[in-house]
Amino acid sequence: MTSQPDNTTPATPSADTSGAAETVGSARKLQVRRAPKYVPFLVAGGLAGIVTAAIFTFMFPADEQFDPSSVFGLFAVLLILPGMGMGAVVALILDRQGRKKSETLVVEQLPDDNGNASAETA
């Protein structure tokens, strides 16, 4: 899950408007949503392109002029990028659905307590 500041609404106004840092205890709104990792989708799309290249290679009868491995290599090169593109489109669709299901939470910063340092390392 990722959390991103909600830029559409300002944080709770403080008494000091000189641009100083937010005071401890001020409330902020954060948007929490699930976001897919794009690299696994790109890898899966590339693998789908390679599998499709293998199917195209062995689906048609072999030609004596070309070696089957060179035909497979040509199809693999031609189909990896479209496969990766399809994986990226799927990831973008899932990302869009995650934005629709996002939640807005109000969080408040707690003061830093150095006396409780041993509890933070657990």
Image (cartoon, rainbow, N blue to C red):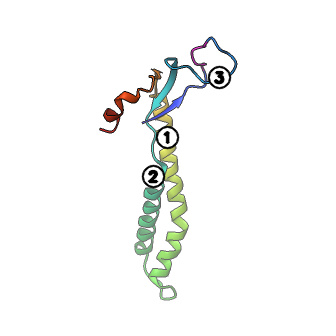
Residue positioned 55% across, 61% down in the render: 81
Residue 64, labelled with which disc? none
Q: Earlier in the sequence, mark 1 or mark 3?
A: 3
Closest to the observer, 42 or 53: 42
Q: What amino acid is found at the position of numbered circle 3 in the picture? A: Ala
Residue positioned 52% across, 64% down in the render: 79
Contact, CB < 8 Å: mark 1 with mark 2? no
**Residue 117 rendering spot, x and y as whole percentages:** 36, 33
Q: What amino acid is found at the position of numbered circle 1 in the picture? A: Ile
Query: How would you classify the magenta stretch by its main secondary structure?
Result: loop
Which one is closest to the eye, mark 3 or mark 2?
3
Q: Secondary structure at mark 1?
A: helix
Q: Earlier in the sequence, mark 3 or mark 2?
A: 3
**Residue 95 rendering spot, x and y as whole percentages:** 49, 39
Residues drawn in magenta: 9-14
The residue carrying mark 1 is: 93
Contact, CB < 8 Å: mark 3 with mark 2? no
The residue carrying mark 3 is: 20
Q: Is residue 122 magenta?
A: no
**Residue 113 rendering spot, x and y as whole percentages:** 41, 26
Residue positioned 51% across, 21% down in the render: 29
Report how far apart the C-alphas of labels 3 and 2 lie in the structure: 42 Å
Q: What amino acid is found at the position of numbered circle 2 in the picture? A: Phe
Residue 41, labelled with which disc? 2
